[in-house]
Image (tube, rainbow, N blue to C red):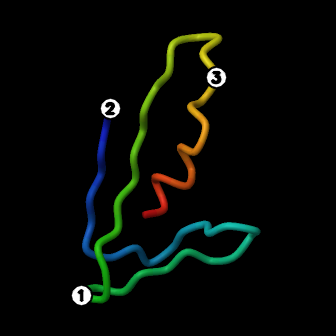
Amino acid sequence: MHVLVTDRQPAGRGRRGRQGLSWEGASLTFSLLWRFAPGTPAPAGLSLAAGL
């Protein structure tokens, strides 16, 4: 698993084509990369859990 944490995100892609922006000091922004074994389906509810 890889995690990239930053205090600002001046450009980004949000859901449904919206912009994903975060200004310095306004929020905690991070990206998570988790590789599953080939052929393994993503766990049910993973997107919901990540949004919490």
Image position of 20 (left or right of 24): right
Q: Residue at x 32, y 76 (%)?
A: 8
Q: Residue at x 55, y 75 (%)?
A: 20
* Residue that label 2 marks: 1
Q: Quadrant of residue 14?
A: bottom right
Q: Which sits earlier in the primary sequence, circle 1 or circle 3?
A: 1
Query: Which residue is labeled 1 in the image?
Result: 25
Task: From the image, state whether disc 1 or disc 2 is nearer to you.
Answer: 2
Task: Give neighbour class at mark 2: few <14, some 14-19, many 20+ (Cα, 10 Å).
Answer: few
Query: In whole angstroms, how far apart are the C-alphas of marks 1 and 2?
Result: 26 Å
Element on which disc 3 rests: loop
Q: Nearer the viewer, residue 27 or 45?
A: 45
Q: Is residue 31 above or below residue 2?
A: below
Residue 23 percent across, percent down from the top left:
36, 86
The tag earlier along the polypeptide, 3 or 2, is 2
Q: Amino acid at mark 3?
A: Pro
Q: CA distance from mark 3 to mark 2?
A: 17 Å
Can you say which quadrant of the picture contains the C terminus? bottom left
Q: Position of residue 11 (x, y in %)?
A: 51, 73
Quadrant where the image shows the N terminus: top left
| Local SS, label 1 | loop
> Which disc number belongs to residue 33?
none
* Residue 9 in picture, x, y percent from top left: 40, 73
- The numbered disc on residue 41 is 3
Residue 12 x/y as whole percent: 54, 68
Query: Residue at coordinates 65% horizontally, 11% vertically from top-left?
Result: 39
Label 2 SS: loop
Q: Amino acid at mark 2?
A: Met
Other-residue count near label 3 (Cα within 10 Å), few / some / many at <14 / 14–19 / ≥20: few
